[in-house]
Image (cartoon, rainbow, N blue to C red):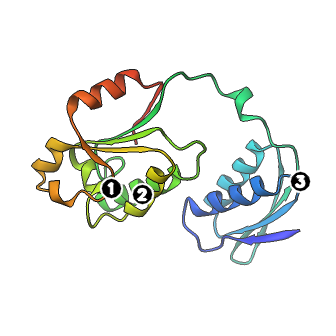
């Protein structure tokens, strides 16, 4: 049984790394080491959602999760059919309200985690302070470029770029307008708002 050491890694890395290993080796059992109770719960829930059984044992510095091989459940049978594109509508450079620093960390994690779903969203539309994520100096440019390489349309509100004096700083995707934004959202099968 292989061991994946995720101790000391922050959310969502333990879940993402475990998911990759489990999907790459559906018939293999896996041992995963995590640092805290939250990671134990998140990794266990992921494994169980993939039809695996999990035995968690407390260890020095965290938990050891023994994940027993099983059949991966068919995602198509559990998800309703959605017609139309999946659009992520980002209206801020942070997620949630409360602490701004935490909000920035959550938004960064959200954007990077979009790379882990298959297929990636069809489009990401950025408005208001969300356009700051698509301009020079943003710490999610690499993730956005990778999403674009995988076919996602990255579109930033042109008026918003002008308002924040960032029009010349757009580093990924294209500038768009409100008509395009409204038409895209009105035709979307699913809209995700972080």
Q: Earlier in the sequence, mark 3 or mark 1?
A: 3
Q: Left of 53 or right of it: where is 61?
A: left
Could one spot residue 110 in this view of the protein? no
Q: Compare residues 91 and 115 and report the one nearer the observer.
A: 115
Q: Earlier in the sequence, mark 2 or mark 3?
A: 3
The residue that label 2 is drawn on is 145
Q: Alpha-carbon neighbours of circle 2 within 10 Å: few (<14), some, or many (≥20)?
A: some
Cα separation, mark 3 vs mark 1, equals 39 Å
The residue that label 3 is drawn on is 27
Q: Alpha-carbon neighbours of circle 1 within 10 Å: few (<14), some, or many (≥20)?
A: some
> Which percent across, then down, holds residue 150?
51, 50
Outermost bottom residue: 60
Q: Quadrant of the C terminus?
A: top left
> Which percent across, then down, holds residue 46?
70, 49
Q: Left of 37 or right of it: where is 63?
A: right
Which circle, 3 or 1, is nearer the viewer?
1
84 over 193 or under it: above or below: above
Q: Compare residues 3 and 186 and report the one nearer the observer.
A: 186
Cα separation, mark 1 vs mark 2, equals 6 Å
The residue that label 1 is drawn on is 172
188 over 155 or under it: above or below: above
Cα separation, mark 2 vs mark 3, equals 33 Å
Disc 1 and disc 2 in contact, CB within 8 angstroms: yes
Disc 2 and disc 3 in contact, CB within 8 angstroms: no
């Amino acid at each position: 049984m292989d061991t994946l050491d995720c101790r000391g890694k922050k959310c969502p890395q333990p879940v993402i790394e475990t998911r990759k290993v489990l999907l790459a080796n559906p018939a293999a059992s896996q041992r995963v080491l995590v640092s805290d109770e939250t990671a134990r719960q998140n990794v266990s829930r992921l494994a169980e959602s993939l039809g695996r059984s999990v035995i968690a044992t407390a260890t020095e510095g965290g938990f050891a999760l023994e994940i027993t091989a099983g059949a991966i459940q068919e995602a198509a049978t559990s998800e309703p059919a959605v017609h139309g594109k999946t659009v992520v509508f980002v209206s801020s450079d942070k997620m949630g309200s409360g602490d701004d620093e935490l909000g920035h960390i959550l938004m960064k994690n959200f954007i990077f985690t979009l790379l882990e779903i298959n297929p990636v969203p069809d489009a990401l539309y950025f408005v208001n302070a969300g356009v700051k994520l698509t301009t020079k100096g943003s710490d999610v440019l690499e993730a956005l470029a990778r999403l674009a390489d995988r076919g996602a349309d990255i579109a930033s509100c042109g008026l918003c770029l002008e308002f924040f004096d960032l029009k010349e700083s757009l580093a990924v995707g294209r500038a768009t307008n409100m008509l395009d934004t409204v038409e895209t959202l009105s035709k979307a099968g699913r809209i995700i708002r972080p």
